[in-house]
């Protein structure tokens, strides 16, 4: 069954729920967000009874804002413990620590950041909230002399974002500092089936503007990416599943793959795929598959068939995060028509309320490999060319 939550439900997900009749938990939020849709609603009490029984049903949520509901209503199940294990990045590092001996990471209380002595830390390193979302509060430190400015930036950003999400999703009281592993970054939508076998439904390469960049701006997928990385990523997920004892469990997993082929963990986001319904919709555009239905029907993608005819094409999910240097209250408008004109084949534009959230929306595109410049151009853009300030 599916637990719907704010801030966003895509039209693709709503149509899927109407057509597939996947049970939807009848919360107040579900009533508000899908009041005009014919959904298969299940009372909250019945959901709790089902999960407190002897079975192990699948629960999927479109938003981590639902974690508080799970902790309140399913407290006697295994789910709150699994969520805590993965949402706290330091706990997750502990789970896999013996696989990466010598890997440096450290828990840091937010109140002690300003006085922290980093003289013995291995550089470069990443600092981010131990419980976080959407690259909020994430910074890369390459030189020790950058630390003072990084502290100032962290304090400023945390003041802006601390109230955007509930503490189960973004908790700024504890940070983790960890060394950087050089390599390409990937995001994977997957599920662990009834017997714990991982099934990859979608994989995306996260491309960056520079070595300093940590933003979630552009994710791409293609026939070539899936063919090259399907086997090693499946093997890595198998190790996670065994250690965490996962079954009937959806997840959005982020990893880095070194030049030597080593797969290193970044994070596991439990019970969901990509945030804001982004990556499931990308899988539909890129491969023609509905990964919500694949999850609940326990379908394994036939990648050989799905990838036919996709040669030379790149599909992207572009996160239009607000990198203008102005907060939403200082911006009058964003020129969505102008940004659409900068791409050869935009597939869908999804607008967001930039006065409330630090992003303008999402853009899904199909790009010929010989025209990758359009994706690297938007990577380098701070998006000021598309806004009108107040």
Image (cartoon, grey):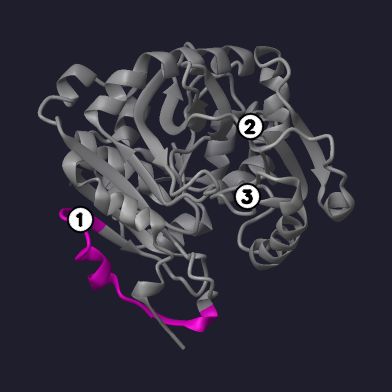
Q: Is residue 167 visible?
A: yes
Of marks 3 and 1, the one in the foreground: 3
Q: Is residue 332 one of those drawn in magenta?
A: yes
Q: Which mark is residue 138?
A: 3
Of marks 3 and 2, the one in the foreground: 3
Residue tagged by mark 2? 86
Locate residue 292: give its quadrant.
Answer: top left
Label 3 vs 2, first from the N-terminus: 2
Q: Is residue 13 visible?
A: no
Q: Which residues are magenta?
A: 329-348
Q: Secondary structure at mark 2?
A: helix
204 relative to 26, above or below: above
Could you tell me which residue is drawn at 25 percent across and 53 percent down? 374
Could you tell me which residue is drawn at 67 percent across and 28 percent down? 92
Residue tagged by mark 1? 346
Locate residue 265: give its quadrant.
Answer: top right
- Left or right of 339 in this view: 111: right
The 10 Å Cα crowd at callout 1, few under 14, some 14 to 19, many 20 or more, is some
Of marks 1 and 2, the one in the foreground: 1
Question: How far is disc 1 from disc 2 in space, using C-alphas?
Answer: 34 Å
């Amino acid at each position: 069954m599916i637990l719907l939550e704010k801030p966003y439900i895509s039209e693709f997900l709503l149509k899927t729920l109407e057509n597939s009749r996947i049970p939807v938990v009848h919360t107040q939020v579900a009533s508000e967000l899908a009041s005009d849709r014919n959904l298969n609603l299940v009372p909250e009490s019945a959901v709790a009874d089902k999960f407190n029984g002897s079975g192990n049903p699948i629960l999927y949520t479109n938003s981590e804002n639902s974690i508080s509901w799970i902790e309140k209503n399913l407290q006697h199940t295994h789910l709150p413990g699994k969520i805590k294990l993965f949402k706290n990045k330091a706990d997750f590092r502990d789970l896999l620590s013996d696989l990466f001996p010598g890997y440096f990471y450290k828990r840091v209380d937010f109140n002690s950041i300003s006085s922290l002595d980093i003289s013995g830390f291995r550089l470069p390193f990443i600092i981010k909230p131990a419980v976080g979302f959407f690259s909020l509060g994430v910074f890369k430190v390459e030189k020790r002399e950058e630390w003072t400015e990084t502290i100032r930036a962290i304090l400023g950003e945390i003041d802006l974002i601390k109230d955007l999400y509930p503490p189960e999703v973004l908790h700024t009281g504890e940070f983790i500092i960890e060394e950087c592993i050089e390599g390409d970054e990937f995001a994977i939508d997957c599920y662990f089936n009834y017997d714990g076998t991982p099934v990859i439904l979608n994989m995306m390469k996260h491309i960056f503007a520079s070595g300093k960049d940590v933003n979630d701006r552009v994710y791409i997928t293609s026939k070539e990416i899936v063919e090259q990385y399907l086997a090693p990523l499946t093997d890595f997920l198998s190790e996670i599943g065994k250690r965490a004892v996962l079954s009937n469990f959806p997840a959005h997993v982020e990893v880095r793959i070194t030049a030597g082929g080593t797969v290193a963990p970044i994070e596991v986001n439990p019970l969901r795929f990509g945030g804001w319904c982004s990556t499931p919709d990308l899988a539909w555009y890129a491969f023609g598959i509905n990964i919500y239905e694949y999850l609940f029907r326990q379908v394994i993608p036939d990648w050989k068939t799905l990838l036919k005819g996709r040669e030379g094409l790149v599909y992207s999910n572009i996160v239009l995060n607000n990198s203008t240097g102005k907060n939403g209250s200082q911006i009058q408008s964003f020129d969505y028509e102008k940004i659409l004109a900068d791409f050869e084949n935009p597939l869908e534009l999804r607008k967001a309320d930039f006065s409330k959230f630090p992003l303008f929306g999402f853009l899904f595109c199909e790009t010929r490999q010989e025209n990758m410049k359009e994706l690297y151009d938007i990577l380098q853009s701070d998006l000021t060319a598309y806004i009108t300030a107040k």
